[in-house]
Image (tube, helix red, strand yellow):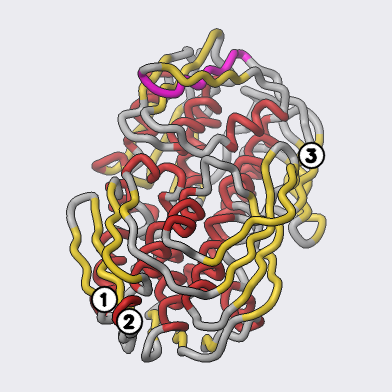
């Protein structure tokens, strides 16, 4: 797919449902007693993989219409042993959280995935789940395919995360639902709390306290979950791409409706505000216990900033598109604390640096940091004219297509098909705003 520079972007859009919440809604629906109705579910490939896995584990999963689904659960500790391997495709969140579901009871399962997911480490999840009582067998480095036999009698544990990770935290809380006693996860930095919010909505007792040594999240087990309706807001990680496009394509003005703005997910918005972006949040409201707003974005000058490492948990998926915004800013933008980008769908830190350099942007790359020397103050814009290897990574593909819309020359992405894993209809939505994508 190729993105070509053109005229301003304009219009009102809605982005697909939040991917993190969509995975969790399906999983908690499968663990709950009764029928869970879900509105606004993201119907990208990653979430559909999770839906298939929940059905294989014995839940009744049915699509009712556009983004509307019903899940009839089996109850905590009562999932069925799957007859076939659970194929998660490219869904890292789905695979890691599902290990927590299976770990809570003595059933056997095998998890498989595509080439990209099979390169991603699972050890950070399997190591603490083994303490709860689950058993694992995998390729070197804890990589898929991976076999798990859940715990005969799951044990509550207190576990300090070595690295802030909402996926590890969530897997441990899900496993702890069937344990006798309190399961505790201690976070060095607060990560997205959709699991805690949704567990409470389904009837679990979850408490959170900020203490001297970090954030303590405690779950009382064993828990009984009762089906509850879930309305999924638009995904801020998806909204990031048309948002930045509107900020860097001259003359643009775009409204993105119904976006989840949970404060543990809005690091990108904080960064863009510090860069001087023409960005406003309007029509703020609560939806199913989550804050929601419409984002109003207008193109204008940006300035370079220093992004502190402690902001990483609130925007880990948004760094590639923030780096694209930095390429159009005046001056130097320094991004720190990016080590997690090395183990995403691709090495996103290296891919972002390579792509920017290929498009004529000066960058410096370290083990867990990136410096982008923006061209905004020079009156120039990134040269573009490059062919970007996305390495099967949807966020790299989308980031550089956005760059191509405002570069001096078109930017081609070698394979845009992975975009459907998280943002089905991405190209059509941007074309509707006036973007030249083909």
In the image, what residue occupies the spot 36% across and 22% down? 160
Read off the magenta span.
213-222
Q: Secondary structure at mark 1?
A: loop
Of marks 3 and 2, the one in the foreground: 2
Q: Residues within 10 Å of mark 3 (few under 14, many from 20)?
A: some
Q: Earlier in the sequence, mark 3 or mark 2?
A: 3
Residue 362, picture quadrant: bottom left
Q: Relative to 195, say whether 352 is above or below.
A: below
Query: Does the rendering let one see residue 392?
Result: no
Measure the C-alpha gap from mark 2 to mark 1.
6 Å
Q: Nearer the viewer, residue 18 or 243?
A: 243
Do callouts 1 and 3 mark residues in contact (Cβ within 8 Å)?
A: no
Disc 2 target residue: 382
Query: Does the rendering let one see residue 438?
Result: yes
Q: Residues within 10 Å of mark 2 (few under 14, many from 20)?
A: many
Q: Main secondary structure of the magenta part?
A: strand
Q: Relative to 221, say whether 139 is above or below.
A: below
Q: Residues within 10 Å of mark 1 (few under 14, many from 20)?
A: many
Q: Earlier in the sequence, mark 1 or mark 3?
A: 3
Measure the C-alpha gap from mark 1 to mark 3.
47 Å
Disc 3 target residue: 229
Q: Which disc number belongs to residue 169?
A: none
Q: Nearer the viewer, residue 166 or 46?
A: 166
Disc 1 target residue: 361
Do callouts 2 and 1 mark residues in contact (Cβ within 8 Å)?
A: yes
In the image, what residue occupies the spot 52% across and 88% down? 438
Q: Nearer the viewer, residue 303 or 18?
A: 303
């Amino acid at each position: 797919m190729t993105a070509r520079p053109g005229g301003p972007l304009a219009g009102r859009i809605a982005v697909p449902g939040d991917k993190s919440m969509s995975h969790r809604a399906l999983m908690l629906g499968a663990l709950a007693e009764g029928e869970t109705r879900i509105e606004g579910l993201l119907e990208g490939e990653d979430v559909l993989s999770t839906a298939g896995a929940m059905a294989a584990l014995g839940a009744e999963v049915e699509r009712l219409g556009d983004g509307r689904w019903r899940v009839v659960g089996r109850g905590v500790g009562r999932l069925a042993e799957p007859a076939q391997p659970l194929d998660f495709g490219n869904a890292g969140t789905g695979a890691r959280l599902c290990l927590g579901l299976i770990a809570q009871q003595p059933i056997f399962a095998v998890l498989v995935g595509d080439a990209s997911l099979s390169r991603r480490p699972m050890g950070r999840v399997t190591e603490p789940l083994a303490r709860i009582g689950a058993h694992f067998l995998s390729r070197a480095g804890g990589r898929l395919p991976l076999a798990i036999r859940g715990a005969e009698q799951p044990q509550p544990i207190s576990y300090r995360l070595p690295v802030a990770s909402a996926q590890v935290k969530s897997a441990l809380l899900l496993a702890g639902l069937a344990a006798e006693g309190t399961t505790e996860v201690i976070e060095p930095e607060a990560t997205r709390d959709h699991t805690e919010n949704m567990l409470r909505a389904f009837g679990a007792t979850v408490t959170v306290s900020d203490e001297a040594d970090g954030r303590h999240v405690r779950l009382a087990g064993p828990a009984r979950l009762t089906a509850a309706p879930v309305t999924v807001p638009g995904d801020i990680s998806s909204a990031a791409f048309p948002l930045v496009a509107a900020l860097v394509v001259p003359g643009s003005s775009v409204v993105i409706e119904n976006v989840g703005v949970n404060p543990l997910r809005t690091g990108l918005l904080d960064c863009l505000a510090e860069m001087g972006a023409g960005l406003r949040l309007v029509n703020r409201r609560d939806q199913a216990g989550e804050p929601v707003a419409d984002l109003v974005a207008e193109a204008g000058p940006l300035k370079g900033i220093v992004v502190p490492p402690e902001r990483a948990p609130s925007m880990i998926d948004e760094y590639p598109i923030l780096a694209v915004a930095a390429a159009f800013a005046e001056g130097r933008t320094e991004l720190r604390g990016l080590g997690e980008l090395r183990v995403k769908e691709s090495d996103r830190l290296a891919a972002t640096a390579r792509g920017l350099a290929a498009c004529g942007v000066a960058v410096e790359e370290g083990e867990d940091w990136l410096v982008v020397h923006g061209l905004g103050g020079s009156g120039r814009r990134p040269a573009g004219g490059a062919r970007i290897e996305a390495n099967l990574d949807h966020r790299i593909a989308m980031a550089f297509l956005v760059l191509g819309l405002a570069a001096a020359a078109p930017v081609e992405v070698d394979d845009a098909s992975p975009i459907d894993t998280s943002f089905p209809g991405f190209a059509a939505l941007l074309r509707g705003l006036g973007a030249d994508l083909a």
